Amino acid sequence: MADDRINAATDAAGLAALISRASEQTGDKPRGPAPVEKWNPPFCGDLDMEIRADGTWFYMGTPIGRAPLVRLFSTVLRKDEDGKTYLVTPVEKVGIRVVDAPFVAVEMSVGERDGAPLLTFRTNVGDVVEAGLEHPLRFTTDGENKELKPYILVRGRLEALVSRAVMYDLVELGEAIDIDGRAMFSVRSGGEVFPIMPADELEALAR
């Protein structure tokens, strides 16, 4: 309901107040994500904030150009069971719009651990995660052209869309692996196997 919306959601003062409240929990310097999963504040309505598919944050239709501000907001993000994404502080929860994923994986490092492949990703807001059991990769195909879209779980239910440039490097690491009796084009990381698509489908797309 309109009356339930955050009172200052339509002006800069409201945004500044939200920043201030979040800063009280995260500090002015990056300290990693806040413990948002432990907080259960009341829902205070929707904020006119949107994260576009390329990872750009918008407030009231205007890009948020300050990287530290975006990083601050990213530390208090939470995606709930209802599938919606919120900015959460100990005293309030406000909804925002996310076009695709809240983060973008912009860099990948290929290494090893105990002789096994290990893929490490960096997001546009500074998160660094190793693909594995706790941070699985998943792959979807989108649109009529079946565009491949990889995602990696960052924390909670929040994922990062792997950027197109990084995706090409990721796919180059793929290999055909037998999974449940079917050859799957997959990548390995952190002791886990992440299937991309059936090998025969990949061959069909490559023709």
Image (tube, rainbow, N blue to C red):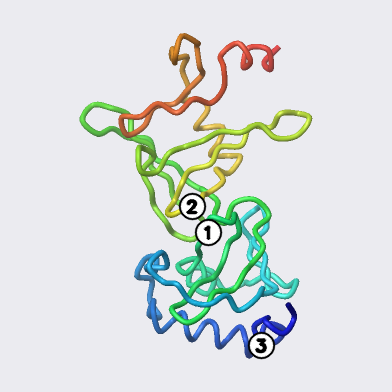
Q: Dot 3, how many residues are within 10 Å of its Cα: few (below 14), some (14-19), or many (20+)?
A: some
Query: How far separated are the C-alphas under marks 3 and 1?
Result: 23 Å
Name which residue type carries label 3: Ala
Q: Dot 1, how many residues are within 10 Å of its Cα: few (below 14), some (14-19), or many (20+)?
A: few
**Residue 80, disc:** 1
Q: Secondary structure at mark 3?
A: loop
Q: Is there a contact, CB below 8 Å, between mark 3 and mark 1?
A: no
Disc 3: which residue: 8
The tag earlier along the polypeptide, 3 or 1, is 3
- The location of residue 45, given as percent across then percent down, is 65, 76
Query: How far separated are the C-alphas under marks 2 and 1?
Result: 7 Å
Q: Residue furthest left?
A: 114
The tag earlier along the polypeptide, 3 or 2, is 3
**Which is in the foreground here, disc 2 or disc 1?**
1
Q: Secondary structure at mark 1?
A: loop
Give above or below for 129 relative to 186: below
Instruction: Give the quarter of the image for residue 192.
Output: top left
Pick the residue in front: 92 or 155.
92
- The location of residue 42, given as percent across then percent down, is 53, 77
Instruction: Give the quarter of the image for residue 168.
Output: top right
Disc 2: which residue: 157
Residue at position x 73%, y 77% from top? Answer: 1
Pick the residue in front: 88 or 183.
88
**Residue 34, disc:** none
Name which residue type carries label 1: Asp
Q: Is there a contact, CB below 8 Å, between mark 2 and mark 1?
A: yes
Query: How far separated are the C-alphas under marks 3 and 2?
Result: 28 Å
Q: Secondary structure at mark 2?
A: loop
Pick the residue in front: 169 or 33.
33
